[in-house]
Image: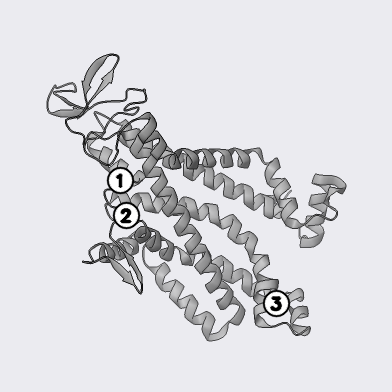
């Protein structure tokens, strides 16, 4: 395997890619140019931005296009389709002509993807569900990353008993299966008689902050480990020793010397963590311990469509497609950021 000097290698890679334009440019500017040249990563950014845009436009869609309230049951409702009055819940529908079946996709503004078993507009609920899933996914990933950076910097820089205590604490959280720990925490919080109260902060069982906090806490070890390992390596580097020789304080060493060098790792991990937290939130909501009624998420919409898979499969398929597209876009973006911030990651052993 070939061995490269990091600084000389990066300079060679940047010179070959950008020519003489690397002179005077910061590493972040060069990383940005690499990312822009990665067409697959840019396509992933566009897909993710579109999903975020349409999800946060859910109120506009529900009120101005679908003209419906996706949170209220509409079992006896009707709507006009091709000049005819159509029942939202149809009696004796399906091949056997038995029972009640919600209207299927109309592919028009009203009930574009049909209705669920409560007569609610599926397309509107998918958009509102995406809004909740994205808020929880992004918020919990940011929370996990912030806590992991703080704990990773403290553990890696000070070492000793501080490192041992924080590392064992993270190992304790890591030892529990993710979903089992999340289910345990959610069950305790959701069954509290008056919700969760921390000082002046009061959270009801239906608050989105409950699943956001739970998911954010259980994923701290996943970001903590690589951050701590990098800090352990950085504190032995020559530029840190030079700063110590100049009389730099611990605060300056952490925030001016070490933190900027771990920022790229956090940037790469963040989209991957968002994808993971969105999947976790959807799974918990599907199990009825994540987002609580009357709110909706992609997981709750899939749960609503579970009993309609044979008659109205789009109720479950639509949010599933949104989850797949979102997670795929975030993973591709994470790979693109890794390649942009660390070109050496694309190098492989030759011969």
Q: Residue furthest right?
A: 20
Q: To which residue does mark 2 refer? A: 290
Q: Residue at x 39, y 63 (%)?
A: 213
Q: Position of residue 54 (x, y in %)?
A: 46, 37
Label 3: which secondary element: loop
Mark 1 = which residue? 300
Q: Residues within 10 Å of mark 1 (few under 14, many from 20)?
A: many
Residue 214's spot in the image, x, y percent?
A: 37, 63
Is residue 5 among the parts visible in the rendering?
A: no
Tags 2 and 1 touching, CB below 8 Å: yes
Residue at the (35%, 36%) spot, across then down? 124
What secondary structure is found at the residue carrying circle 2? loop
Residue 117, image x and y in percent?
21, 35
Q: Secondary structure at mark 1?
A: helix
Cα separation, mark 2 vs mark 1, equals: 9 Å
Report crowding for label 2: few under 14, some 14 to 19, many 20 or more residues within 10 A (C-alpha): many
Dot 1 or dot 3, earlier in sequence: 3
Q: Which comes before the other along the chain, label 2 or label 1?
A: 2
Front in this rendered view, residue 92 or 251: 251
The residue lying toward the viewer, choosing from 288 and 206, is 206
């Amino acid at each position: 395997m070939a061995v490269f000097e990091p600084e000389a290698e990066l300079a060679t890679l940047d010179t070959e890619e950008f020519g003489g334009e690397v002179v005077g440019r910061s590493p972040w500017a060069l990383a940005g140019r690499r990312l822009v040249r990665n067409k697959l990563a840019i396509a992933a950014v566009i897909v993710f931005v579109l999903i975020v845009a349409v999800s946060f436009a859910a109120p506009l869609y529900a009120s101005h296009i679908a003209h419906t309230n996706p949170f209220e049951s509409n079992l006896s409702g009707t709507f006009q389709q091709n000049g005819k009055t159509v029942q939202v819940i149809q009696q004796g529908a399906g091949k056997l002509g038995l029972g009640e079946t919600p209207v299927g996709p109309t592919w028009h503004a009203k009930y574009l993807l049909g209705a669920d078993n409560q007569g609610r507009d599926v397309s509107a609920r998918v958009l509102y569900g995406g809004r909740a899933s994205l808020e929880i996914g992004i918020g919990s990933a940011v929370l996990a990353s912030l806590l992991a950076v703080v704990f990773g910097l403290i553990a890696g820089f000070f070492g000793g008993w501080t490192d041992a205590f924080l590392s064992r604490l993270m190992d304790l959280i890591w030892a529990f299966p993710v979903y089992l720990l999340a289910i345990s925490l959610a069950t305790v919080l959701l069954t509290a008689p008056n919700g969760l109260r921390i000082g002046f902060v009061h959270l009801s069982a239906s608050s989105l902050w409950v699943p956001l906090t739970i998911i954010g806490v259980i994923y701290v070890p996943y970001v903590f480990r690589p951050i701590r390992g990098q800090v352990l390596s950085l504190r032995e580097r020559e530029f840190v020793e030079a700063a110590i020789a100049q009389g730099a304080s611990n605060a300056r060493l952490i925030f001016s010397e070490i933190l900027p060098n771990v920022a790229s790792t956090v940037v790469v991990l963040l989209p991957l963590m968002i994808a993971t937290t969105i999947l976790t939130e959807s799974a918990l909501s599907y199990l009825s311990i994540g987002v609580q009624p009357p709110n909706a998420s992609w997981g709750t919409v899939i749960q609503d469509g579970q009993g309609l898979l044979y008659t109205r499969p789009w109720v479950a398929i639509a949010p599933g497609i949104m989850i797949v597209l979102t997670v795929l876009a975030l993973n591709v973006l994470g790979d693109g950021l890794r390649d942009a911030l660390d070109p050496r990651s694309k190098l492989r052993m030759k011969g």
